[in-house]
Image: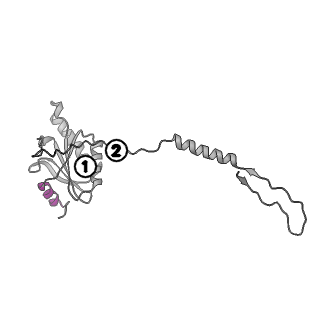
Amino acid sequence: MAELNTGDGGGKKGHIRSKKQNAGVDLTAMVDLAFLLITFFMLTTSLSKPQSMNLAMPDKDETQEKPQTLDVSEDRTLTLLLGEKNQLVWYYGLPTAPIEGPEKTGYGKNGIRKEILEKKQTVKSKYAAEPKKQDLIVLIKASKKSTYRNLVDVLDEMAIADVKIYAIVDITPEENAMLKKEEILSE
């Protein structure tokens, strides 16, 4: 039983007084109520659940001798090269003869998101008569020195810009050389 003591109730030394009974307050009901409220709010509130993004990756086929290649139209393809120190390079078209780029940019709404949205509009207007070809294709290529956070940031940009077709693929030696030329990748 919980109790609250309020003092001894005695007087000064030298004076004889009758001892008064201490006033006691029973706190049992208040403690019970507090635990009931805590339990109620813990059970009724929903804790924040971790959110994840769906990412479909193909299975590796060990029996296949030659890797499959998929030809994509260069005027629909934007390639993102993730370098070190939170920097990236993008180019539009083929790596050997890009239509635009390569250009160094950052992450966020004034960086790569702006470029993605511009290229989406370009592809949509160019293929207005062909609805099946109106989607931008984004190839994401991470160098060995890029971080996992950079890849997650780019995948977030794909979700924000509503890019329907994108793939994470291996970076080629030519693209590694491009990153070194742009001073985004050290030796």
Residue 116 locus on image (x, y percent): 23, 44
Q: Residues within 10 Å of mark 2 (few under 14, many from 20)?
A: few
For the residue pair 111 and 78, the one nearer the viewer reads as 78
Tag of residue 112: 1
Name the outermost residue toward the right. Answer: 16
For the residue pair 32 and 45, the one nearer the viewer reads as 32
> What's drawn in magenta, residue-wise?
173-183
- What kind of residue is marked 1? Ile
Label 2 residue SS:
loop
Residue at 42% x, 44% y is 49
Residue that numbered label 2 is attached to: 52
Residue 81 part of the magenta-drawn span: no
Label 1 residue SS:
helix
Tag of residue 152: none
Residue 42 locus on image (x, y percent): 53, 44
Q: Is residue 164 visible?
A: yes
For the residue pair 182 and 54, the one nearer the viewer reads as 54
Dominant SS of magenta comes to helix
Residue at 69% x, 48% y is 28
